[in-house]
Image (cartoon, grey):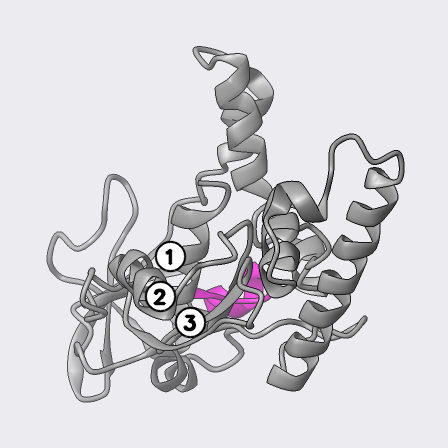
Amino acid sequence: RLFVRNLPYSLTPSTLLPHFPNATDANVPTDSKGRSKGYAFITFPHSRACSAYVSQRCTASSKEAGFGSEPGYDTVIAGRNCTVTYARPKHNPGDAASSGRGVTYKARLELRRRAGAGGEEDKKSWNDTYLDSSEVRSYVSKSMGMEAADAFDVDDKGLAAKVALAEADVIAYVRGWLDDLGHGGSEGDERSTTAILVKNLPHTITRPTLAKSMSCHGKVSAIHVPKCGMVAVVVFEGEGEARKAMRRAAYS
């Protein structure tokens, strides 16, 4: 990876990536208002492609541009003089989770969950099969015009079967809703890079309430909530904002 600074603030991941031939990803960090911070991390498929860019497109910097012992290089991007250095290795939260040094058991579990958020398994599907059973009962009883205690009587021997059927019906509805929305996540398809699925919500969740809690991660362009609530699809304007929301909000 390369670390590039002094970038034009107008550049986004999609407009920056073409400036780096053979690069596979451009991560442009943004502030709470969705504005670029003026630097980026560029990922290449292997070290040879990364080194080739530096040798072909950059010149050795005459100033103290590098961090620590890393040398700095100069290049021009979108008409602006920028500084390029080789990025430090990514910090892996899973390292602390696996080592256990100075970390409580509960904290290790949380770190493992967060380390896995957005991984390869997450990219295969939306994993929409988990719904809070108490919220399902509340939603179903409300749609029937009944109190939850009446619709799902604890003394009913068939209560477990009723709850299971209710959950299956709601899950089927949510999956159909996601398919209609274009975010169904069919097997083999990667999910959107700007949209995240938010689960374990109250069945009474509203768009304004969710917008207020998600806007701190970046600029939200759309929020989709099914009639049953409990889940939502939040679409951000940029990939970097969606990544930030995923990292900060995962398992929170």
Q: Secondary structure at mark 1?
A: helix
Horizontal side, residue 119 vs residue 29: left or right: right
- Residue 72, can we see it? yes
Check contact, mark 3 vs mark 1: CB within 8 A: no
The amino acid sitting under disc 1 is: Lys
In the rendered image, the vertical position of residue 251 relative to residue 194, given as above or below? above
Horizontal side, residue 243 vs residue 171: left or right: left
Which residue is tagged 3? 239
Check contact, mark 1 vs mark 2: CB within 8 A: yes
Write the start and end of the magenta stretch as one range.
Answer: 42-52
Which residue is tagged 1? 244
Horizontal side, residue 250 vs residue 156: left or right: left
Q: Which mark is residue 241?
A: 2
Disc 3/disc 2 C-alpha distance (Å)? 5 Å
The amino acid sitting under disc 2 is: Glu
Q: Residues within 10 Å of mark 1 (few under 14, many from 20)?
A: some
- Residue 41, can we see it? no
Q: Secondary structure at mark 3?
A: helix
In the rendered image, the vertical position of residue 153 relative to residue 237, given as above or below? above
Q: Position of residue 31 (x, y in %)?
A: 20, 61
Check contact, mark 3 vs mark 2: CB within 8 A: yes
In the rendered image, the vertical position of residue 124 relative to residue 105, given as above or below? below
User: Does the magenta segment cover residue 168?
Assistant: no
User: Which comes before the other along the chain, label 3 or label 1?
Assistant: 3
Q: Quadrant of residue 187?
A: bottom right
Disc 1/disc 2 C-alpha distance (Å)? 5 Å
Question: On the rendered image, what quadrant is the N terminus found in?
Answer: bottom left
Q: Position of residue 244 (x, y in %)?
A: 38, 57
| Residue at x 28% of width, y 72% of height | 219
| Residue at x 27% of width, y 40% of height | 69
Q: Secondary structure at mark 2?
A: helix
